[in-house]
């Protein structure tokens, strides 16, 4: 079996959200006061998470597993979940998307558990802008976390940045300079309508085109030759290479036609798209005693309804009820 949809796409990349909680409050993601967190009894246990990943890997052709959240480093069983995932056959590639708070302590145990790579979210290299965007004074913890990830061999370490109008939209060149100095691969992501507060405004969004124009004031960018494939980032060589910078134009140049992703939320719902308005409940079946075969069949069925695109620019577009932090970005 495989996770195919009605448009010929096959999902091989599984994003697993380990919690909807977070220790930052990025303004484009969550309100200052936080959210009503998922109820504890609805959260999958470590064993349940590993079981579903195993079904995906053994029966459904999942080749890549990325842990995310909320903030996945807040999940107590993370190292154990990673080591049980990397022990699966065939061994999937395993990575983590994190804000890096606490990564200075966890990078080594995670590397020893088999984690292959990390993506760290960092939108600015100015401590005061960091506090403004994330509502927490933790910039230096992120810097330490990044250094620890690199030292532990969790590379190439990628940095993901979102630019926000009036906050850090003038900071693209300095972010790139800093990442080049530290040997991190920088990717900019267009802001998407997935914030819990529904504050996203298409007109105010900083576009990929604008980001590239801003970078070109300081750097020479040329398209990198490697094919984009299903990877969402468009890559550019910086000043002739070998360093690159990427731009993920989810809104202005969508890549839905090449999507190979599927998502599992911390409460056991399969989402066939970030923007899906429907999800498929695997938790109830799992807890009712479904065997691997039945879980796999339910998962296959969940993919059939995957829409051809996110439709952000359609007049009828409706943001999903679940915010990014509870979906797993
Ligand atoms: N807490 C972890 C982190 O920040 O890396 C993992 C979860 S976070 C939801 C995953 C990624 O989604 C981060 O890179 C974050 O910048 C991005 N993100 C959150 N809200 C977004 C939005 N509205 N538009 C675009 N990216 C967003
Ligand atoms: Fe937390 Fe990540 Fe959302 Fe920021 S983007 S509030 S770090 S989940």
Image (cartoon, rainbow, N blue to C red):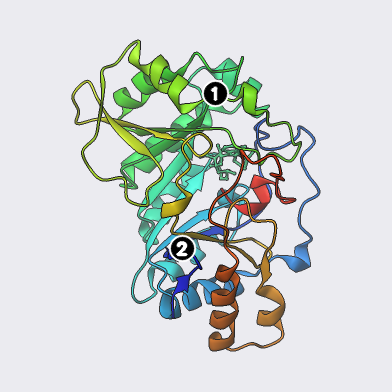
| Rendered image: mark on residue 284 | none
What is the crowding at mark 2: few (fewer than 14 residues within 10 Å), some, or many (at least 20)?
Answer: many
Q: Which residue is mark 2?
A: 82
Residue furthest to the front:
315
**Secondary structure under the numbered disc 1 in the rendered image:** loop
Q: Is residue 55 above or below residue 9?
A: below
Q: Residue at x 63, y 22 (%)?
A: 204
Distance in Å between CA atoms under marks 2 and 1: 35 Å
Residue 203 visible here: yes
In depth, the one of 141 and 263 nearer the eye is 263
Of the image marks 2 and 1, the number of the one nearer the N terminus: 2
Q: Where 57 falls versus 276 (above or below)?
A: below
Q: Residues within 10 Å of mark 1 (few under 14, many from 20)?
A: some
Q: Nearer the viewer, residue 223 or 13?
A: 223
The residue tagged 1 is 206
Residue in view at x 41 percent, y 46 percent: 118
User: Can residue 104 be seen?
Assistant: no
Residue 138 point in image, percent of width and height? 58, 28
Assign the N terminus to one quadrant of the image. bottom left
Q: Residue 96, image x and y in percent?
A: 46, 51
x and y percentages locating residue 121 in the rendered image: 50, 36
Of marks 2 and 1, the one in the foreground: 1
Q: Is residue 192 above or below residue 81?
A: above
Ligand 1 is located in which of the four quadrants? Answer: top right
């Amino acid at each position: 079996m495989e996770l195919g949809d009605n448009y010929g796409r096959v999902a091989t990349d599984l994003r697993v959200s380990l919690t909807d909680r977070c220790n930052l409050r990025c303004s484009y993601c969550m309100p200052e006061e936080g959210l009503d967190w998922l109820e504890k009894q609805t959260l999958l246990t470590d064993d349940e998470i590993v079981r579903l990943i195993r079904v995906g890997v053994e029966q459904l052709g999942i080749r890549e597993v990325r842990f995310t959240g909320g903030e996945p480093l807040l999940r107590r069983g993370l190292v154990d979940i990673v080591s049980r995932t990397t022990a699966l056959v065939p061994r999937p590639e395993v990575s983590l998307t994190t804000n890096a708070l606490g990564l200075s302590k966890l990078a080594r145990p995670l590397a020893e558990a088999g984690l292959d790579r990390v993506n760290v979210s960092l939108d600015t290299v100015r401590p005061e802008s960091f506090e403004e965007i994330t509502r927490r004074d933790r910039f230096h913890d992120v810097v330490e976390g990044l250094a620890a990830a690199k030292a532990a061999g969790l590379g190439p370490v990628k940095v993901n940045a979102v630019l926000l109008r009036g906050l850090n939209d003038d900071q693209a060149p300095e972010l790139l300079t800093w990442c080049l100095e530290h040997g991190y691969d920088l990717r900019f992501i267009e802001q998407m309508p997935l914030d819990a507060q529904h504050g996203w405004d298409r007109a105010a969004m900083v576009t990929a085109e604008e980001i590239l124009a801003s970078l070109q004031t300081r750097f020479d960018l040329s398209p990198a030759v490697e094919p984009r494939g299903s990877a969402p980032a468009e890559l550019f060589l910086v000043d002739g290479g070998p360093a690159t910078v990427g731009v993920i134009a989810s809104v202005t140049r969508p890549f839905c036609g090449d999507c190979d992703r599927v998502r599992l939320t911390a409460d056991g719902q399969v989402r066939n798209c970030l923007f899906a308005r429907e999800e498929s409940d695997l938790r109830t079946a799992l807890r009712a005693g479904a065997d691997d075969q039945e879980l796999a069949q339910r998962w296959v069925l969940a993919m059939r309804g995957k829409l051809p695109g996110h439709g952000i620019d359609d007049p009828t577009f409706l943001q999903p009820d679940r915010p990014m932090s509870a979906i797993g970005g």
